[in-house]
Amino acid sequence: MYIDKYKIYNMRYQWKNGKQDKSESVIHSLHSEDSIRGKDFIALLSDLNDAWNKHESKDVEIEVTFKSTKED
């Protein structure tokens, strides 16, 4: 299976004037319209989590949409 395009966001609460914001902000993102094999995508997610979050635990949410192939 191939994933045709994807958007990955890393969110974090920011601190301003010694107080934590009430809403999260995007601190990292990766967008691509180049296809990637499913198992390579899972490896990419794991590597990004290690690079972006180091020892910080994060909740992960995934939404998948299967669309019909466009005919030319």
Image (cartoon, helix red, strand yellow):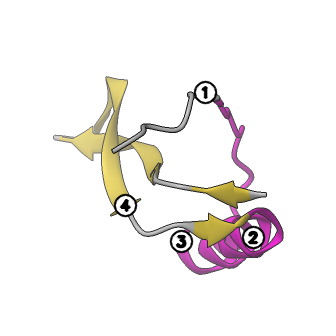
Name the one closer to the observer, 22 or 36. 36
Image spot of residue 52 (x, y percent)? 53, 71
Q: Is residue 44 magenta?
A: yes
Q: Nearer the viewer, mark 2 or mark 3?
A: 2
Q: Name which residue type carries label 4.
A: Glu
Q: On the image, numbered disc 1 is attached to which residue? A: 65
Judged from this view, the residue extending furthest toward the left is 17
Q: Answer whether residue 10 is visible to the viewer in this image.
A: yes
Query: Which range of residues does the magenta coloring cover?
Result: 38-65
Point out which mark residue 52 bears: 3
Q: Is residue 5 above or below residue 55?
A: above
The residue that appears at 44% across and 49% down in the rendered structure is 9
User: Label 3: few (<14), some or many (≥20) within 10 Å?
Assistant: few
Left or right position of 64 against 71: right
The residue that appears at 79% across and 57% down in the rendered structure is 1
Q: On the image, numbered disc 2 is attached to which residue? A: 46
Q: Name which residue type carries label 3.
A: Trp
Name the one closer to the observer, 51 or 72. 72
The disc, 4 or 2, on the residue closer to the chain's N-terminal end is: 4
